[in-house]
Every structure is written in C-alpha cells, then in structure tokens.
Image (tube, helix red, strand yellow):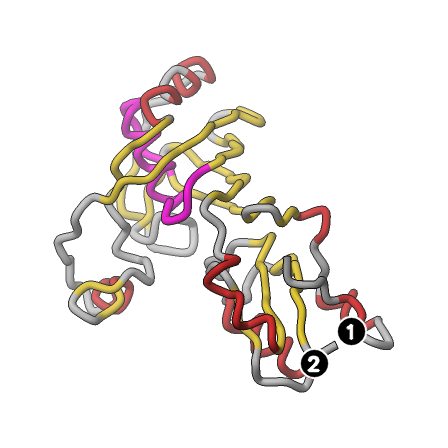
Amino acid sequence: MDGGILIMDKPSGFTSFDVVAKLRGIFHIKRIGHTGTLDPMATGVLVVCVGTATKAVNRLTASDKVYEAGIRFGEKYDTGDITGKLSARSDMAITEQDFRQIFDRFTGDIEQIPPMYSAKKVNGKRLYEYAREGIEVERSPEQIHIFSIELLSFDYPHARVRIHCSKGTYIRTLIEDLAEGCGTVATMESLRRTKNGDFSIEDALTFDDLTDSSDPWSLLLPVP
C-alpha cells in the first residue's frame, strides 16, 4: 500500500501538526497531511491522509462536524478556553432551563465573529499572532450553520453539550455567545470532536494502536 487514511484520536496537548510529525516518524514518510485542525487542548477525530492519499485532503475536508464540549459558567478567558487568562467574572447563576431556552436562538444559520485566538488570517497574518502582541483586529462576522445543540449534563457552574455544526464554527465563541444570551459569561473547559463528516470516533486509532502494530500500514483505510 502506498497510501491511505487514518482516523486518529488526537490526544490533548498535541497540535494537529504535532500529530502529523509523530506519524511521519511512525510511517517513515513525509507525505502526510490532515483535513481539519484541532486546538491543542482538544481531543478526538483528526482525519489524516498518508502517502498518495494526501491528494484527497481537500476533497475529504468535511462540511459538518460534531463536538462534545465542557462549559464553565461564571468565568471568561481571553482565549475563549481555560488555557488563557481570566478576563471577566459573573456571579449570576443560571438554571438548566435558562440555558436550554437559549438554544433555539443559536440553531440554524447564524453569524459568528472569529476569535482573536484563532488561525484565521487577516492581512496575511494569523489572528493569534496579533493577539499575542496585544493587538485587537477588527473581524467581520461569518455565516455558519448550527444543526443542533444537545445538553448532555448540567451541574452549575458546569455543563456539557453536543454540537453538530458546519465547518468554520468556533465552539469557544459559540459557548461565549450562549452564555451572553443568558446574561452571564462562560468558557470552554474541554472539547472532543466525535465526528468529522463520515468519520467517527468509534473508528479512531491512538498512537499506542499504531506503535503496538507490527505493520501500521495495514491499519490505513482506503480513500473513499
């Protein structure tokens, strides 16, 4: 086999590029790419193309994704998640019903302003580079689609949601907007991508699966 697809379960603490770099060492090949970035703190489905399959990266980039996110109410961070610096607090407690009733406002076609701590480019420079320099850049809202928001658990000040969304959606920003709609603040404390297009977490492999295999190439899936 000269190429194929890997559905990786990305561990927390790795950038998507870190995953690619480690896989290059496992497969002893440079031609490896992925179809959708995950933040370092995030875990879950990362679709990786190996060898000749890299030609299909653009075609395999999914139009919709599913995430499970942990939320912490009452605190807001400059990065939109708990890896950043605390920027705001709120003592306003909300109930499960308060939270649920806001979901309809953020389902369907909505506009979202990309966060400063993101890889989106403005004038040829990534937003997070401006943010690290303490520069706030004006960003235009972009249209995204939220197919559904499902509440998995609620134990104030924590909650977990499952979000089915279009590509280009920033879950961190959606969480902040949901909280603002309830009159409070919140931040993302965990994120796991469970589905990326047709690829699901049930089919994902870990690094241990690959290193324990006598032939990791045999674990590759054919390009659909």
Q: Which mark is residue 204?
A: none
Check disc 1 and report the residue beneath it.
216
Mark 1 packing: few (<14 Cα in 10 Å), some, or many (20+)? few
Q: Is residue 46 magenta-colored?
A: no
Q: Name the residue: 65% across, 59% down.
A: 7
* Quadrant (top left, top right, bottom left, bottom right) of the C terminus: bottom right
* Quadrant (top left, top right, bottom left, bottom right) of the N terminus: bottom right
Give, as a three-letter code, the residue at label 2.
Phe
Residue 203, horizontal then vertical, whole percent? 72, 51
Left or right position of 85 against 198 = left
Left or right position of 113 against 138 = right
Give the residue furthest to the front. Answer: 224
Q: Name the residue: 36% across, 55% down.
A: 84
Q: Name the residue: 52% across, 54% down.
A: 42
- Find out whether the residues at labels 1 and 2 contact each other: C-beta distance under 8 Å: yes
- Please provide the residue range marked out in magenta: 165-186
Check disc 2 and report the residue beneath it.
27
Q: Is residue 217 visible?
A: yes
Toward which corner of the image does residue 68 lie, by quadrant? Answer: top right
Mark 1 to mark 2: distance in Å?
7 Å
| Element type where label 1 sits in the image | helix
| Element type where label 2 sits in the image | helix
Residue 169, horizontal then vertical, whole percent? 37, 45
| 198 versus 58 height, above or below | above
Q: Is residue 192 visible?
A: no
Q: Nearer the viewer, residue 105 or 41?
A: 105
| Numbered marks: total | 2
| 27 versus 146 height, above or below | below
Left or right position of 199 against 93 = right
Of the image marks 1 and 2, the number of the one nearer the N terminus: 2
Q: Is residue 174 magenta-colored?
A: yes
Give, as a three-letter code, the residue at label 1.
Pro
